[in-house]
Amino acid sequence: MSDLDKKQSAPESAAVSEPTALVPGTAEETFLSVRDLKIHFDTDDGLVKSVDGVSFDVRRGKTLGIVGESGSGKSVTSLGIMGLHQKAKVSGEVWLDGENLVTADPDHVRRLRGRKMAMIFQDPLSALHPYYTVGAQITEAYRVHHPVGKKEAKARAVEMLDRVGIPEPAKRFSSYPHEFSGGMRQRAMIAMSLVNNPELLIADEPTTALDVTVQAQILDLIRDLQKEFGSAVIMITHDLGVVAEMADDLLVMYGGRCVERGSAEKVFYEPQHPYTWGLLGSMPRIDREETDRLIPVKGSPPSLINVPDGCAFNPRCPYADVPKDNLTRTVRPELREVGSGHFSACHMSQEERTRIWTEEIAPKL
Amino acid sequence: MLLLVVSAVTFAIFFLVPRIGGQTVDQLAVQYVGKDANPESVAAVKKNLGLDQPLLVQYYDFVKAIVVGANYQFGPDPVTCNAPCFGYSFKTHVEVWPEITQRIPVTLSLAVGAAVLWLVSGVTIGVISALKRGSIVDRLSMTVALLGVSLPIFFTGLLGLALFTSQWPIWDTIEFVPFSESPGEWAWNLLLPWASLAFLYSALYARLTRAGMLETMSEDYIRTARAKGLRESKVVTKHGLRAALTPIVTIFGMDFGLMLGGAVLTESVFSFQGMGAYAVQAVRESDLPIVMGVTLTAAFFIVFCNLIVDLVYAAIDPRVRYS
Amino acid sequence: MSETTDVTTPDQTANKPGSSAEPLLRVDNLVKHFPIKKGLLQRQVGAVKAVDGLSFEVRPGETLGVVGESGCGKSTMGRLITRLLEPTGGKVEFEGHDITHLNVGKMRPLRRDVQMIFQDPYSSLNPRHTIGTIVSAPFRLQGVQPEGGVKKTVQELLALVGLNPEHYNRYPHEFSGGQRQRIGIARALALKPKLVVADEPVSALDVSIQAQVVNLLDDLQDELGLTYVIIAHDLSVIRHVSDRIAVMYLGKIVELADRKDLYTKPMHPYTKALLSAVPVPDPARRGAKNDRILLRGDVPSPISPPSGCRFHTRCWKATEICTTKEPPLLQLGTGHQVACHHPENADDQAPQDTVLLTAAVAAAEVAGVEVPADKEPAAAADSSAAAAAPAASEGAKTSKSDEDGAE
């Protein structure tokens, strides 16, 4: 769409090619490739850089977890992939199954939406239309992409409702969203997303609004369906527990940028960015002996209008002064490979980071 | 519900309206008899109209007359006033209800045509404005809308009359032609009144629709509809507009009901003999039976329209049905 | 508190001052029904049985965690014990005084001792008041003249909760979510309360901010000797902050126990299912997720809760008796109360059933061994568990299949 920030994109391009290294030799498995995606919004208060140069890959049958706090740009990234951002300036590349969606005809992208790529939203009560029956909404999703009659579409919708575990699907077909419980609504939402067998499923905080026992059911369902359809899944959440359970690969976002990326094991066991450490330290854990204190990150997330110079995390980073020459406050750190398929955007040397993690952070977790 | 409200209104009208004029029973009777009032005729009228009865009895008679009709003994022959009977005009001694029924078609024609016009144009403009928010189209139509809301009907109406009957005479005169006589003439003559009424209301509805659309189009379910791959036109009409219309239905019911009670200004500007003009004349002449009759009819229309609104509301929003 | 990592079994309540004293708060058979009215005459057609017979005590200096899913009545409970709501039945005693039906005037002195912190830091602060006004409001309402003047005291309070005292004259919108929650806490602490009831104090906050607030609550308790009742749906947070924990389901307490007891050997099937449903932030545990107990369906409506044990509709152990007879909350271990006809981990069957949860943890540690041991100190610390893991996960499998059979 727009080729903004040309001067910035030059140094970025060096880092852009890296993600392919995630899956060496298995490039055909990569279903979605995002390269240097930027999504900026012009507002009265200034340019909001919601997503500012993010790259990643998602493989077929695998799950990428995107973790971050509110305002980190994780949801906007997913809307950008789907082409659902409104009035935004988008640059970079989004390759879906060999097609660049950023430069593609919007109507073509529309035809891919809901068929090739589908989305599940956080709050199924507000994401489902209150005036239409659940069945009508699923049928509609099917008929957009399939030239079939009402009867056939209904049969398909009932089949999907049944598949996602809604009891008496034929009867519930004519129920309205408000007649469903929270968990059932999210099931219906999933049924709607999957009615066209999408190859990419983006789940944006799919269980945040749900109780923990229902969350377990929904995560289980998503996992089963992924296995069944072999779809690529992007799971966006702030809950490290959920990604740990679902994701093969992990992307940690902060201030609209990717600060760390790698396999879930790498990111959880050998995190290479102080923000990731902060997240791990902030979280009370149910699986460990209770520690005395949590190790929070000081301060609050940055405003996306006024992202700090240099490393976006520097005002909150306890190690901001470790690199010399005030580097963290002046130069934006590139995403560098720190291990096989493991990337981190931090000015500290790998030795320093490894030392800090093993000696100072890990023992306290 | 409908009955309850109408009875409450009847009650209010009966006990409040005569007091507002501040007239005593005798004055009323004198008024009824007219210029040649003398004590005997006044007393006779009081007796005939039941004005000498206690107030509650009068109320009973009043309601009874509306429901089943009444018999009066003015001269040697008894007169039957069929239900719904609101009595006789104090001035002309003509039965009120037939007068009202004569005027309802005028008001109804005016209201229905204008309503269709303002709904269609108002909602369309509102939707376009909301979708093109901040654009020239939006700003222009909202400015015109502001103008429409601020200009009173006697200004736009008279301006229209001046322009199209004398400046560029499209119409020679404008007079009401019943629909049953000639639908074409009916519509043609009503066009200008419709337009001037609709100008005011469509401005209001455009602003309402715009606000409603702006709100619904930012709802999560609109994003869901887009995520399904629906065409934008379908997202707007099927998912956005339907939700945005609910508050408009409510207000429309009110406005339409009110208008059935008489579009006073429009009727007088175009010299139509509608309910509004009738009521104004009656009030000016303190012609109580007519005032009461018109008020009650208008109240009935408003209540009736609101009932329809509730039904429509339930049809639009399933959540209403179950709560 | 000390910075030791290896807090194995500190009996926290025993360490706290005055734990042997009278309970600070005693709740007996507390009931709150919200009537449902219908029709023109507003006839009562039923009631939402939000809280339906709760009995518990809160001891001075401890933190009682209350956990449960939405609709279990935990928030209503919070509003009942702070008397923001009038109980339908039962009794609430604060320091031995019956406060169940005190009117607003009689409650006023009590408001000094009992304060509440709310979930939403955005809506619980008046946007048109400065922080100074908000935090000093309790002084005005109570007619208290703090030593050293209101302004100085408020600034001290702001400093206490980690805010800049200079920000006295700012408005709520100038603060971030975490800071706003600090303001709410400062307001609650203004009158030096004895009991603070916090309803979801961190659930609206981002993870990194959550930790700041949790630590703050922790510090304040140590510093001021506060007693907390913390209501939350997040089991990890509850585990971190609480000394004792009550688990609620459909208006009832199903289990109440010390933290360690509850998390290591839950006795109520619901608690067990709840604990097993929490996603664990450890990718290696993915292999162990089959041990998860997936409850069927949703929580039934509190308008017409199931007969007998309210959990029987979703319980894999339910038998005839569960559908007819309501299990009383019984003491089944030291300080461990359970309302269940077929408790898990009861003394006679403890070894086998505890396996399920610990096995999951242990299995996780085993998988984590791929990571060099020195980088995974937790695993090292728990190496004995790791050694036992293969056997343990076997046990987990069998116990799971037992459950399947029972379904």
Image (spheres, rainbow, N blue to C red):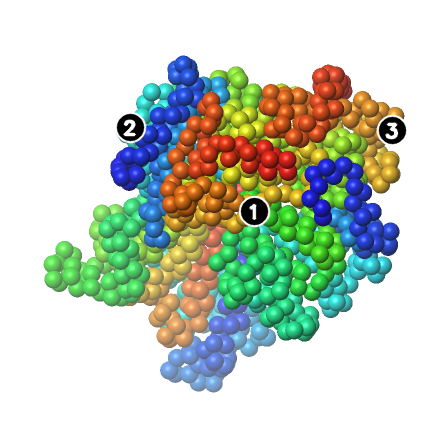
User: In the figure, A282 relative to C108: above or below?
Assistant: above
What numbered label is drawn on residue A104?
2
Q: Residues within 10 Å of mark 1 (few under 14, many from 20)?
A: many
Residue underneath mark 3 = C347
The three-letter amino acid code for the residue at tag 1 is: Ile
Q: Residue B295: x and y, percent?
A: 44, 64
- Which element is circle 2 on? loop
Identify which amino acid the numbered label 3 is placed on: Asp
Where is the C terminus of chain C found, in terms of image quarters?
Answer: top right
**Residue A2 x/y as whole percent:** 27, 37
Question: Between marks 2 and 1, how big is the CA–CA gap?
Answer: 40 Å
Under circle 3, the secondary element is loop
User: Is the residue at mark 1 from the same chain as the one at mark 3?
Assistant: yes
Is A61 left, or right, of C402 in this rendering? left
In the foreground, B317 or C348: C348
Callout 2 amino acid: Ala
Where residue A278 sits in the image (x, y, percent)?
Answer: 55, 40
Given the current orientation, which residue lies at the most extreme left position? B168
Tag shown at residue C209: 1
User: On the same chain: label 2 and label 3?
Assistant: no
Element type at marker 1?
Answer: helix
Q: Does residue A285 sit above or below C75 in this rendering?
A: above
